[in-house]
Amino acid sequence: MSENTFNVIGGRVQVDITDKNMKATVSIKAPTNDSEPELVLQDVLVTLKVAGVKFGINEKLIGKYLADKKWDQLFVVAEGVYPTVGNDAIFGYNFSTTKSLKPQITDDGHIDYKEINVICSANKDDLLVKKIAATQGTSGTDVFGNELPGKFGKDFNITAGAGTYKDPKDASIIKAASDGIITYNPKSLIVEVQKLYAIPGCVDFSTGNVHVKSSVDVGGDVKTGFSITTPYDINVKGRIEHAEIICDGNLNVKGGIVGDGKQIIKVGGDIHTGYIRDQHIICHGGVYAGTEISGSIIESGDDVTLVKPDGRIVGGKIVASSKIVAGGAGNKYDVPTLLEVGVNFTHREKYLKKYEMINEAHTQAETIKKKIDLMDESLPDPGMNNAYKALKDQHKAAIEHWERMCADLKEIEKDYFNVDNPVVMIMKTVFNGVTVKIRHAVYEVKQDMTHVMFKLNGDQIECSPIK
């Protein structure tokens, strides 16, 4: 849309200023008769001068339009230089900002699982974060020759949370106020140093249940019937036995996790442990077990990986967002084992709830249909019966309700199955009795296979050898 319009030379040259004074366009009208003088470059330049245009004029282009007699065609004869946007503020971190150091899995299935440390600690007055401020971009110029200042990049700050402070000599630096465990939330941009709650022995009758707002270090086991709850990390040097664990950070268990199917372990970060047996786990991060996951229900928002070459999954149900990797799956006794990938963990609860509602609606419709069928058989003229008519109306409404929920489910599935390249990799043997599910597709293993990868090919699961 034109912001200003100028006409000179008998109205034959029209100049329009557009794009917030960043462009000047010209339209040259054809002569009305042969006696009218021919326009030259200077005529157009005079019009531009009257309009105030003095920067970015393309005289060569004007000359070409005049020579080619391109009348009544709008073209850009001058364009300013746009100001640029500077760099966003960035932060230098003196600690790892990832929730855990995952074992790296290559395309050929090799697992590089070295000694890791999932806890980042700090000493008093250690440098934690240094901010590099946003910068201003280069200036520009509009077609009137006015300088336009460059724009600043996005500026944001990290909050110095509990256990930290800003350096009084340099507010861009955050330091540790005390010794402790570094926690960083990339969503809320808060860095904290939490003092470690250390338990030299076991969590048992000598300690009671542990509910703290700090990282927890357990020197022994977490015994049967006890619990640990914290918004931070938990490090257990022994094992967890039939206990309840709830943490928003990472769970690191040097021994293993043994359950009885009654307790649920809920973890916001990753889990690293030696083994998992008969345990229900809901983990928003990845689950990394050394030797075995058996008889367990695992729901992971990332990968589920058996990190030892002979690590195996036997029985139970393993659901991972993107990848399941193990040495073996199932056993020679054909124990049922379900391996599922390709689901977005953040939409899982919504999907399962809707799926359950659909089943209930279908059951309700079927129950009404059976009553209608019974009346069809027993009544001579059921269409004249008011109760029969009411049942027919109820059945129609139930079917329509079921169809609406099925349509809703399809919309939810767009997010629920939005996972790139989900895969199941079994490095040694996958036994008969194992079922692989990727999104909607299901593959039942009917005979033992070795070194195999399961992935989607269209709507079907294909298995291919791992080289």
Image: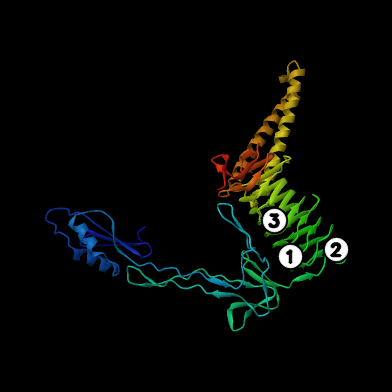
Amino acid at the residue labelled 3: Ala
Q: Which residue is mark 1?
A: 235
Q: Residue at x 37, y 62 (%)?
A: 19
Q: Earlier in the sequence, mark 1 or mark 3?
A: 1
Badge 2 local density, few (<14 within 10 Å), some, or many (20+)? some
Q: Which residue is mark 2?
A: 204
Please name the amino acid that badge 2 sits on: Asp
Instruction: Specify whether 148 is left or right of 251.
Output: left
Asked if residue 90 shows in the view, the reply is yes
Circle 1 packing at 10 Å, graded few (<14), some (14-19), many (20+), is: some
Residue 321 visible:
no
Judging depth in this view, the residue of 357 and 144 nearest the camera is 357
State the image coordinates of residue 415 (x, y, percent, origin top left): 59, 48
CA separation in Å, label 2 and label 1: 16 Å
Check disc 2 and report its element: helix, strand or loop: loop
Q: Residue furthest right?
A: 205
Q: Could you say which is closer to the camera, residue 196 or residue 443?
A: 443
Q: Which residue is at the front of the view, 407 or 440?
A: 440
